[in-house]
């Protein structure tokens, strides 16, 4: 990777490649799926576009367990979307 290129990741919902800064990262902590705000936790993560459509696709296609390579309890979509929105908003500040 050249010095001027930014890292890219693939959204588990729409399968589009984007810069890591344009996606939201998820991790498993204690068997539960959590949104990682600053991308500081080590280990495997799952990346998702901050859109409800991508979230629905990822949940429907079991994208989280596949990307994280483990069974994971995915909270209901409304709660997960609320957490995504709050994390994205906190990163903008």
Image: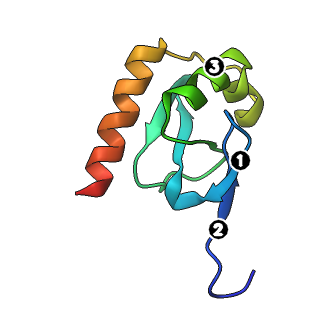
**Residue 57 placement, left or right of 34:** right
The mark nearer the N terminus, 3 or 1, is: 1
Residue 12 found in image quarter: top right
Q: Is 64 above or below relative to 76?
A: below
Name the residue: 72% across, 20% down: 62
Name the residue: 27% across, 48% down: 90
Q: Are marks 3 and 2 in contact (CB under 8 Å)?
A: no
The mark nearer the N terminus, 1 or 2, is: 2
**Mark drawn on residue 59:** 3
Identify the secondary structure beneath mark 1.
loop
Of 50 and 44, nearer the camera is 50
Q: Is 75 above or below relative to 67?
A: above
Instruction: Name the residue tied to disc 1.
Output: 16
Identify the secondary structure beneath mark 3.
helix
In the image, farthest residue toward the left: 93
Q: Is 80 above or below relative to 8?
A: above
- The answer to whether residue 45 is visible is yes
**Residue 22 placement, left or right of 85:** right
Q: Position of residue 69 (x, y in %)?
A: 77, 32
Quadrant of the frame with the N terminus: bottom right
Q: Are marks 1 and 2 in contact (CB under 8 Å)?
A: no
Q: Position of residue 40 (x, y in %)?
A: 47, 56
Name the residue: 62% across, 86% down: 4
Q: Position of residue 79 (x, y in %)?
A: 38, 18
User: How far separated are the C-alphas under marks 3 and 2?
Assistant: 25 Å
The mark nearer the N terminus, 3 or 2, is: 2
Instruction: Name the residue tied to disc 2.
Output: 7
Identify the secondary structure beneath mark 2.
loop
Check disc 2: other Cα within 10 Å, few if <14, some if 14-19, many if 20+.
Answer: few
Q: Position of residue 64 (x, y in %)?
A: 67, 28
User: How far separated are the C-alphas under marks 1 and 2?
Assistant: 14 Å
In the image, farthest residue toward the bottom: 3
């Amino acid at each position: 990777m050249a010095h001027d290129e930014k890292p890219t990741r693939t959204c588990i919902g729409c399968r589009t490649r984007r810069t890591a800064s344009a996606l939201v990262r998820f991790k498993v902590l204690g068997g539960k799926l959590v949104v990682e705000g600053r991308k500081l936790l080590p280990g495997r993560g799952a990346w998702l576009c901050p859109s409800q459509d991508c979230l629905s696709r990822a949940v429907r296609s079991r994208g989280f367990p596949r990307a994280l390579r483990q069974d994971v309890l995915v909270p209901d979509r409304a709660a997960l979307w609320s957490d995504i929105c709050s994390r994205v908003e906190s990163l903008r500040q």
